[in-house]
Amino acid sequence: LISNVLTLFAFIIGMLTGCVGLVMNEIEKSWFEDYGGAASAFGFAFLIGIVISMITLSVVDSSVNTVLVCFAEAPAEFEQNYPELSSEMRDAWREVYPAECGF
């Protein structure tokens, strides 16, 4: 779920930076006139925005995956090192999956 949300967020960032490219094209038309004008300005800025945001948001995605692996693979160690976070995650899992949650 988090990967889908972060990908959507990166797409939105790409769209916003594409709009910045359009504004840049309106300010100085000579920058993009050899490359097709507004479409190339939007496309170039969109690609830059989406690539940089995907690289940045991949750190958040990896962090979430790390916490979930710690919770699933080593719950005792997770409880020992991060008792508050472990308690919150256990409560959330019990709320969402009451029959399947065995702890």
Image (cartoon, grey):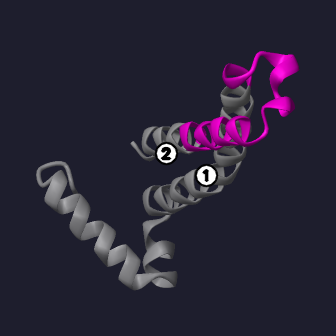
Please tell me which residue is depicted at 28% across the width and 68% down the height of the picture.
Answer: 90
The numbered mark, 1 or 2, whose residue comes first in the sequence reads 2
Q: Establish if 12 lies above or below 80.
A: above
User: Residue 15, percent across and down?
Assistant: 55, 37
Please state which of residues 55 and 95 is positioned toward the viewer in this rendering.
Answer: 55
Please state which of residues 52 and 18 is positioned toward the viewer in this rendering.
Answer: 18
Please tell me which residue is depicted at 43% across the width and 67% down the height of the picture.
Answer: 75
Residue 7 inside the magenta-drawn segment? no
Q: Amino acid at mark 2?
A: Phe
Compared across the picture, whether 36 is left or right of 97 comes to right
Please tell me which residue is depicted at 53% across the width and 53% down the height of the picture.
Answer: 65
Main SS, magenta residues: helix
Q: Amino acid at mark 1?
A: Leu
Q: Establish if 19 lies above or below 58.
A: above
Please state the extent of the stretch shown in magenta in the rendering: 14-40
User: Residue 84, percent across and down?
Assistant: 37, 84
- What separation in Å lies between label 1 and label 2 (alpha carbons)? 9 Å
Please tell me which residue is depicted at 30% across the width and 74% down the height of the picture.
Answer: 88
Residue for badge 2? 9
Q: Residues within 10 Å of mark 1 (few under 14, many from 20)?
A: some
Residue for badge 1? 57
Furthest toward the left, the residue is: 99
Marker disc for residue 28: none
Quarter-of-image position of residue 41:
top right
Quarter-of-image position of residue 93:
bottom left
Q: Residues within 10 Å of mark 2 (few under 14, many from 20)?
A: some
Quarter-of-image position of residue 72:
bottom left
CB under 8 Å between callouts 1 and 2?
yes
Disc 2 element: helix
